Image (tube, helix red, strand yellow):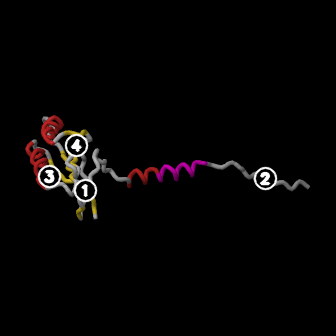
Amino acid sequence: MGLQSKNKVNAAFSMSSMTDIIFLLLIFFMLTSSFITPSGLEVNLPSSETSDIAMQEVTVSVTKDLRFAVNDKVVSRENVKAELTSLLADKKGQVVLHIDKDVPVEYLVEIGGIAAGLEANVSIATKPY
């Protein structure tokens, strides 16, 4: 009497379903991650109810100790206009201002005026409540 099973159990483990799950998780985390690029200087942004994300072509950062940076390059207050002029030459760009909430408004108005004079769209970076 030969009582043997016709169906043999395969002990090999298939990794294809595991890799599918890993790729789906990878795609999920890539799509839900934040698209905000951090500025070069540490800035404590003010809060607002709505915080729209703008494509950042040029960023200007001002810290509470009045250090200025244009696209992560630390510059003096007098050189901000020259730096913005060279970056926005012959095109209308987007300038995002990363201004610390403790900085006086006159610096915000000054840099916003420089960017507006260069025909750039100006927006202020904030963090949501």
Q: Which residues are magenta?
A: 15-25
User: Label 4: few (<14), some or many (≥20) within 10 Å?
Assistant: many
Classed neighbour count for the residue bearing mark 2: other residues with Cα under 10 Å, few (<14), some (14–19), many (≥20): few
Relative to the observer, which residue lies in front, 129 or 76?
A: 76
Q: Is residue 20 magenta?
A: yes
Between discs 1 and 2, the one toward the N terminus: 2
Q: Earlier in the sequence, mark 2 or mark 3?
A: 2
Picture quadrant of residue 67: top left
Image location of residue 95, percent across then percent down: 18, 46
Residue 69 tag number: 4
**Residue position marked by numbered label 2 in the rendering:** 6
Quick one: label 3 or label 4, which is nearer the N terminus?
4
Residue at image coords 51%, 51%: 22
Quarter of the image containing the C terminus? bottom left
Residue 56 on image: x %, y %: 24, 46
Give the residue drawn at x 17%, y 37%.
83
Q: Nearer the viewer, residue 89 or 64?
A: 64
Give the mark, 1 or 4, whose residue is nearer the N terminus: 1
Query: In the picture, which quadrant includes the N terminus?
Result: bottom right
Would you place residue 73 above or below residue 21 in this image? above
> Quick one: label 3, few (<14), some, or many (20+) residues within 10 Å?
some
Residue 45, numbered circle: 1
**Marker disc for residue 29:** none
Identify which amino acid the numbered label 1 is placed on: Leu
Real-space Cα separation, disc 4 to disc 2, in angstroms? 75 Å
